[in-house]
Image (cartoon, rainbow, N blue to C red):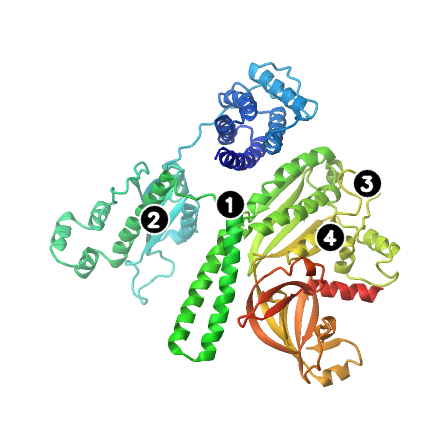
Amino acid sequence: MTESYSDVFKEEAREKLLELEDALLELEANPEDAEQIGCVFRVMHTIKGSGAMFGFDDIAAFTHEIETVYDKVRDGIIPVSNELIDLTLKAKDQIKFMLDKSPKGEDPQKPILEKTISAFKKLASGDGTTTTPPILNPSSMWASPPTIQKLPSDSDVTYRIRLKPATDIFMTGTNPLLLLDELRSLGECKIIAQTDAIPSLEDINPESCYTCWDIILTTDKGINVIKDVFIFVEDECDIRIDVIDAGISTEPEEDYKKLGAILTERGDITEQNLNKALNEKKYIGEILVEKGLVTHDKVESALMEQKHVRKIKEKAQAKEEGISSIRVPVEKLDVLVNLVGELVTVQARLTQTASRLCNAEFASIAEEVERLTAELRDNTLNIRMLPIGTTFGRFKRLVRDLSQELGKEIDLMTDGAETELDKTVIEKLNDPLVHLIRNSIDHGIESPDVRIASGKPRAGTIKLSALHSGAHVIIEIKDDGKGLDRDAILAKAVDKGLAPPGVELTDKEVFGFIFQPGFSTAKEVTNVSGRGVGMDVVKRGIEALRGSIEIQSEKDKGTTVTVKLPLTLAIVEGLLVEMGDDHFVIPLYLVEECVELTREDILNAHGRDIAYIRGEMVPYVRLRKEFDINGNAPSIEQIVVTGINGDRVGFVVDKVIGEYQTVIKNLGGLYKDVEGISGATVLGDGTVALIVDAPQLIKNLEVAQMS
């Protein structure tokens, strides 16, 4: 039991350390950010308390010294400086080492630990002559402590805003919709337009505004920020702002106001007319509209307000109760995914059997099982999905440390951190992205002096972005550095025998050479790069994830590396094809189209494996020949045209059966080195279909042509 608690502590501590690193890097950019100072203090306090509870006394004692320093930072006694940030980042690395080390044996980093503790103690004592440990690169501290800003309140307040612009507001060039967009940016916002004042078409003036709006806004920005939205139009609009929920109580039994109370409070109906309506046995909203006491729009607006406030209260209550997530070991998720995979296979057999028996009742049951299995499959896979921002956050430290080592100034920008990917893909993606970012820092971004001389900003920029594209995620690493030297790459490729001299090649073909093993144009080897063992590893890693990678570059403008990855590795959408008695699956994300290949097409190609598809030459590979399948091919074959890294290549098969959702199975150790096959799947009738590794087959074909 104690060992189980220790594992839980270690896992939570590692999560806290990632949070700590992000806070420190934010604090370095904004030294007066009281929220980040508080975050650092809370992380240290949590690790110290939990460490002492579960017997990690060395970690508790170490974090106590750091906590003491940041307590004084919170009070404005000790300033935030580069020295303090450096020291705390090194301390974070030391805590991680202490979590990972074996409980037995001598700690090789004990001297560093003692020096780090000594440095924090001197900071806490207020000794300005503190000497940091030799592992650090300190800089001078600030002469005076920063002003600590007061943390904002956590409570959200809900406001009712009634906006009625003047009829001639358009004549001043004002667009009320822009005001509504600005309100939406302040928090959770619901808007209903009141259109009852709009006249009939023959009486309408297109240059007049007849619409007013009811807005319900929940925000923590305060009423003054809301008033600032209307600061330039307050003389041209009738504006009323009321607080309708202060966000303090979250008790479930405390319901929001009834519909009639909201309408009365707004002044849309008198209390006398409301009481008359309440005597009838219909919904209050229907009665009020039928009697002409209020318009339908006003009732809708009141109902919207009621629903909005209830939703906000439910969210606050759930947050207060702490019902957000549970911690599940990855091994259990893997077992669940495997079981769902087996269930998908059995369900396919059930559907096929029901179709063969032609029994209506049995077919109905099979259809219901298919629907439930699909929902279970999708939900199970979603459990494994994580935002890619967990990986993006780790690169801030990499960029900071490496840019300092190389004497460069680099800003890392991220976009699309909320984009979700399968946990397995994220874990295997880390190393390729590290290589790509290190290359951008070392080869791409110039030194500050060079950038200034060429008219660029002193600090370079690396932008890391992610976005969904169908069943894939597109990741881009873009820098504004010097770009790739096309001539140098081509000359090196010719020198190494990768390209014939004098042949005109496209930029894509030239830049593709940098993915070759041992390829490097660096004039000297450093501890960062130059050995030619980076980009080939990147490409192999991306292709192992069933992804692709492309490079675009412009000299003196920068380089963009685009990585395309599937959302999950557990299940792949495939195109089921047939050759003789055997079945194969080609991943659907590669397939562009399917066309016929007749004997006449083969004769017109004059012995070359090339098909003319709408005037374009497309080379093809005969899978019968590649996989040594016996028997004669049919008179009319099918070409499955694929797009791989921008190239169109066809695969000739006997017959295309159709789309098939594939649960991937490993081939086992005996067949792990078989080229051209990436896995297998079980079909509905129990037979096995092999999954074609199309990129590997094309790579083998290219190697064969070059040799």
Find disc 1 in the rendering and name its residue. 329
Nearer the observer, 399 or 610: 610
- Residue kind at label 3, given as amino acid type: Val
Q: Which numbered disc, 2 or 3, marks the residue that appears first in the sequence?
A: 2
Q: Are marks 3 and 1 in contact (CB under 8 Å)?
A: no
- Residue kind at label 2, given as amino acid type: Ile
Residues under labels 3 and 1: Cα distance?
Answer: 42 Å
The residue depicted at 41 percent of the width and 52 percent of the height is: 177
Nearer the observer, 630 or 538: 630
Q: Which element carries disc 4, helix, strand or loop?
A: strand
- Drawn side of residue 487 relative to residue 29, left or right: right
Mark 4 surroundings within 10 Å by alpha-carbon count, few (fewer than 14), some (14 through 19), many (20 or more): some
Residue 486 at what x, y percent from top left?
Answer: 80, 53
Q: Which numbered disc, 3 or 1, marks the residue that appears first in the sequence?
A: 1
Q: Nearer the viewer, mark 1 or mark 2?
A: 1
- Drawn side of residue 555 relative to residue 76, left or right: right
Q: Which numbered disc, 4 or 1, marks the residue that appears first in the sequence?
A: 1
Residue 257 at what x, y percent from top left?
Answer: 23, 45
Above or below, 379 against 261 in this view is below
Find disc 2 in the rendering and name its residue. 215
Find disc 4 in the rendering and name its residue. 554
Mark 2 surroundings within 10 Å by alpha-carbon count, few (fewer than 14), some (14 through 19), many (20 or more): many
Residues under labels 4 and 1: Cα distance?
Answer: 46 Å
Label drawn at residue 233 = none
Placement of the C terminus among the 4 image quadrants: bottom right
Find disc 3 in the rendering and name its residue. 525
Q: Are marks 4 and 1 in contact (CB under 8 Å)?
A: no
Above or below, 72 against 284 in this view is above
Mark 3 surroundings within 10 Å by alpha-carbon count, few (fewer than 14), some (14 through 19), many (20 or more): few
Q: Inspect this view and state whether residue 248 appears.
A: yes
Residues under labels 1 and 2: Cα distance?
Answer: 44 Å
